[in-house]
């Protein structure tokens, strides 16, 4: 049963996954080492923030990974248009989940850290947690595309994208960490996340368009910007909090109405998407 063709196919498939795993090692594997080297007293705050980020990313992956068998079946049927629609629709869901799982800990970063590890770590840990949350919300926007990509066996065509993110993240973390300490390492992750989304958009997606067919314009407007508009109240609350203009006494009074409005907007978007997806309605002429 051992054949050279089978071995080559397995090697090519696994090599792409290995490159992606190595790149994730560059993104997350060296952060604590760098923080220990540049600002040792921030290791505790950074490790707690990184643990929270791991939880958010893991929860999102657990939700989105359920579409892998469906995506693999679509690829087996050689249906690139349907795979493209799956990417756009799952990106909508992913963006909504990212905002609802990322913005609340961003707004309540100080109380969470105070409860978890004590008040003495809040001044150092709060900006680190905020930057890491923003960085991972940006980079995880591309997670639905990556899941469909692996399901369709196309990861071998995009080795440059994950390597670009990993190398950029490492270089920026080392350079900024040397200048700014732990917060510089976190900013390096933010810079790497921007490179991740950019390389996916301009390098990876054109190369996989034959198997996963969708318009990048539709991906940006329907998959990313539309759900962001639906959760705009919660995003606005997060932006005000990051700017330091959300007074502690008014935090709950602002947060809960913004959550309610964002839930309504998300429900309207997902219901509209479901109607279009299953033929229960048609978009108005000229709509996105």
Image: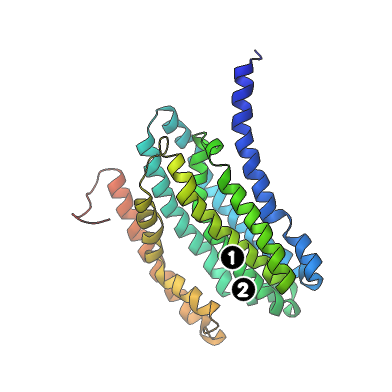
Rendered-image quadrant of the C terminus: bottom left
Contact (Cβ within 8 Å) of mark 1 with mark 2: yes
User: From the viewer's perspective, is residue 254 above or below residue 63?
Assistant: below
Secondary structure beneath dot 2 equals helix
User: From the viewer's perspective, is residue 83 above or below residue 196?
Assistant: above
Residue at 20% over, 56% down:
286
Residue at 68% over, 63% down:
173
- Label 1 or label 2, whichever lies nearer to me, is 1
Decide if residue 262 is on the left or right side of residue 29.
Answer: left
Q: Visible in this render: residue 181? A: no
> On residue 109, which mark appears?
2
The Cα atoms of the two marked residues, 1 and 2, are separated by 10 Å
Q: Which residue lies furthest to the left in this view?
A: 285
Residue 33 in the image, given as x and y percentages of width and height: 78, 60
User: From the viewer's perspective, is residue 241 above or below residue 203?
Assistant: below
Secondary structure beneath dot 1 equals helix
Residue 35 in the image, given as x and y percentages of width and height: 76, 66
User: From the viewer's perspective, is residue 100 above or below residue 142?
Assistant: below
Indicate the colouring scheme: rainbow
Residue at 45% over, 37% down:
71
Which mark is first along the chain, 2 or 1? Answer: 2
Residue 80 in the image, given as x and y percentages of width and height: 38, 35
Residue 153 in the image, given as x and y percentages of width and height: 52, 33
- Count neighbours of disc 2 (C-alpha within 10 A) and say few if under 14, some if 14 to 19, many if 20 or more: many
> On residue 154, which mark appears?
none
Decide if residue 101 is on the left or right side of residue 80.
Answer: right
Decide if residue 269 is on the left or right side of residue 150.
Answer: left
- Count neighbours of disc 1 (C-alpha within 10 A) and say few if under 14, some if 14 to 19, many if 20 or more: many
> On residue 133, which mark appears?
1
């Amino acid at each position: 049963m051992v054949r050279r063709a089978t071995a080559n196919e397995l090697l090519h498939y696994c090599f792409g996954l290995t490159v992606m795993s190595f790149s994730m090692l560059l993104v997350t594997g060296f952060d604590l080492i760098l923080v220990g080297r540049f600002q040792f007293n921030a290791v505790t705050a950074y490790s707690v923030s990184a643990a929270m980020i791991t939880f958010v990313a893991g929860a999102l992956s657990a939700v989105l990974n359920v579409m892998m068998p469906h995506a693999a079946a679509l690829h087996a049927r050689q249906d690139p248009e349907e795979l493209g629609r799956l990417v756009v629709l799952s990106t909508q869901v992913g963006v909504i989940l990212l905002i609802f799982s990322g913005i609340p800990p961003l707004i309540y970063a100080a109380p969470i850290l105070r409860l978890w590890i004590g008040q003495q770590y809040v001044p150092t840990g709060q900006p680190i947690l905020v930057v890491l949350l923003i960085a991972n919300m940006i980079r995880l926007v591309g997670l639905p595309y990556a899941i469909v990509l692996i399901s369709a066996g196309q990861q071998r065509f995009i080795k440059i994208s994950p390597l670009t993110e990993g190398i950029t993240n490492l270089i920026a973390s080392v350079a900024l960490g040397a200048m700014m300490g732990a917060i510089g390492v976190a900013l390096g992750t933010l810079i790497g996340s921007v490179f991740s989304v950019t390389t996916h958009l301009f390098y990876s997606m054109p190369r996989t368009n034959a198997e996963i067919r969708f318009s990048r314009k539709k991906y940006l407007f329907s998959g990313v910007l539309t759900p962001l508009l639906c959760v705009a109240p919660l995003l606005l609350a997060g932006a005000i909090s990051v700017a330091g203009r959300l007074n502690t006494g008014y935090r709950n009074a602002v947060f809960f109405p913004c959550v309610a409005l964002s839930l309504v907007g998300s429900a309207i978007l997902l219901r509209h998407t479901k109607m279009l997806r299953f033929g229960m309605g048609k978009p108005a002429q000229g709509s996105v």
